[in-house]
């Protein structure tokens, strides 16, 4: 009993203590309320605090709008960076092209630089018998883009390794021009350019996605270009080509009556100022031979030895941008302008081959004759190749229909024979033009 009583007493004491604590807390709360009422009559959050919150909301909103503007600016900046990168990429491509050209020249012309130093530099001793060789390749000129910035831009986009095929054309040769560029495209030669001599050819090339260049108006050139004969138009090329060489480009000059069957740039030596196809029809006439002239009245001295070679064809030749090459163009153009009746191919060969003699300073240009079975004229094809079973199996690089007036018909027949495999395509044509 005594234990129950003690437990009850303890419980009453703890309840009394708990009640006292509640009363104390209430009293403290009331006192704090009074204090805050006196010190903060406007409450914990005043109107100034509300304004601060409002300002904070506005600031966040402005920051969101600002970030949107910044995003647009960033997009524009990125677009600008992309454009800048494209321009740099274009410049880098040009630089790579230039470096590739230098590398090709370095690989192909091994020893040429050393030979130039040896030949043009200080005097030197002669080496052992059979080891002495003269300089074969003249150095190229320094390019000058200021002479024709528009052409320089076109060549920069079209040429490969600073080499390009160039043809001059007016409306008189439109049909042949189509065969010309169709086969160039089929072979896969991107570095070709048509120099359009009238509006019709310019538009024709553009409509067929053919690289084309129209020269600035030139009365001396335009009159011949629009109304001149084939020979007259052919003579213009020596004036037109000068700018290409001044810009530092090697040119493979082509007439329009040529069918391309392989890429000619894969078959050039590039060791001479001029590398030309020949009008010769066999090894003797194309590469030269000793022609003995017989004059019986001279008795013991009746036989005189002469050196003969058939002319280079001025309708297909590769010319490097060297001083002798440009001098050749200037000489030929000057003679053709002073004597309009002269034939450009005859003048071209005279200036290239005639030596210096009293009253005349010859041209010091190096030259190479192209392989007549790779760079084939139409006399070789129709007089020899088509009649020989072994030669018929050879595939030339180009066929030039220079010996025959029915050029367009024979061009199509060449395509039928070499491209489409029609074995009798050439059979019905005569050897000559009878």
Image (spheres, grey):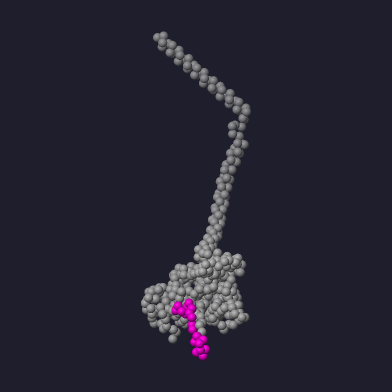
Residue 157, percent across and down? 53, 65
Where residue 226 sits: x, y (%)? 55, 79
Give the residues in magenta: 282-303
The spot of residue 125 in percent (x, y) is 57, 66
Percent across and percent down for residue 191 are 50, 68
Residue 421 or 264: which is nearer the viewer? 264
Query: Between residues 310 and 192, which one lies in front from this camera angle?
Result: 310
**Quarter holding residue 408:** bottom left
Q: Which of the 4 quarters of the picture holds residue 187?
A: bottom left
- Identify the residue at horizontal 48%, vertical 77% (top origin): 287
Farthest residue to the bottom: give it. 297
Quadrant (top left, top right, bottom left, bottom right) of the C terminus: bottom left
Q: Residue 293 in magenta?
A: yes
| Extreme residue in the top direction | 2
Above or below residue 49? Residue 282 is below
Q: Residue at x 40, y 78 (%)?
A: 385
The image quadrant where one finds the N terminus is: top left
Q: From where the camera sits, is residue 72 visible?
A: no
Residue visible at 48% across and 80% down in the picture? 289
Position of residue 33 relative to residue 66, above or below, is above
78 displayed left or right of 410: right
| 108 in the magenta segment | no
Looking at the image, which residue is at 48% across and 67% down?
Answer: 190
Residue 322 shows in the view: yes
Residue 154's quadrant in the figure?
bottom right
Q: Is residue 209 above or below residue 27?
A: below
């Amino acid at each position: 009993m005594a234990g129950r009583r003690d437990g009850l007493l303890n419980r009453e004491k703890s309840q009394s203590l708990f009640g006292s604590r509640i009363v104390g807390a209430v009293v403290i709360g009331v006192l704090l309320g009074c204090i805050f009422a006196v010190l903060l009559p406007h409450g914990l959050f005043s109107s100034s605090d509300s304004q601060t919150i409002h300002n904070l909301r506005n600031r966040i909103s402005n920051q969101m709008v600002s970030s949107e503007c910044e995003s647009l600016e960033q997009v524009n900046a990125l677009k600008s960076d992309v454009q800048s990168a494209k321009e740099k990429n274009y410049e880098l491509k040009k630089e790579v092209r230039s470096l590739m050209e230098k590398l090709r020249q370095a690989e192909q012309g091994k020893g040429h630089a050393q030979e130039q130093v040896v030949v043009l530099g200080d005097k030197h001793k002669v080496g052992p018998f059979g080891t002495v060789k003269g300089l074969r390749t003249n150095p190229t000129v320094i390019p000058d883009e200021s002479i024709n910035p528009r052409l320089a831009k076109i060549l920069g986009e079209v040429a490969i390794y600073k080499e390009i095929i160039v043809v001059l054309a007016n409306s008189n040769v439109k049909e042949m021009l189509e065969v010309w560029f169709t086969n160039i495209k089929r072979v896969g030669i991107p570095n070709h350019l048509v120099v359009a001599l009238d509006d019709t050819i310019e538009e024709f090339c553009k409509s067929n996605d053919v690289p084309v260049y129209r020269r600035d108006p030139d009365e001396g050139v335009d009159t011949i270009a629009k109304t001149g004969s084939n020979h007259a138009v052919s003579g213009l090329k020596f004036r037109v080509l000068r700018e290409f060489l001044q810009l530092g480009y090697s040119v493979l000059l082509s007439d329009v009556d040529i069918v391309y069957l392989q890429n000619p740039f894969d078959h050039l030596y590039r060791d001479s100022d001029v590398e030309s196809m020949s009008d010769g029809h066999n090894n003797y006439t194309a590469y030269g031979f000793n022609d003995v002239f017989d004059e019986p009245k001279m008795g013991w001295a009746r036989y005189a030895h002469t050196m003969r070679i058939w002319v280079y064809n001025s309708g297909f030749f590769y010319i490097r941008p060297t001083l002798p090459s440009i001098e050749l163009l200037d000489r030929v153009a000057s003679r053709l302008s002073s004597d309009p009746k002269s034939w450009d191919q005859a003048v071209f060969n005279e200036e290239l081959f005639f030596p210096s003699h009293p009253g005349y300073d010859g041209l010091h240009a190096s030259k190479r004759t192209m392989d007549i079975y790779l760079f084939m004229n139409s006399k070789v094809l129709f007089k020899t190749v088509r009649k020989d079973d072994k030669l018929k199996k050879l595939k030339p690089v180009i066929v030039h229909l220079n010996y025959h007036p029915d050029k367009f018909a024979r061009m199509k027949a060449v395509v039928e024979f070499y491209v489409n495999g029609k074995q009798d395509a050439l059979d019905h044509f005569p050897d000559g033009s009878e």
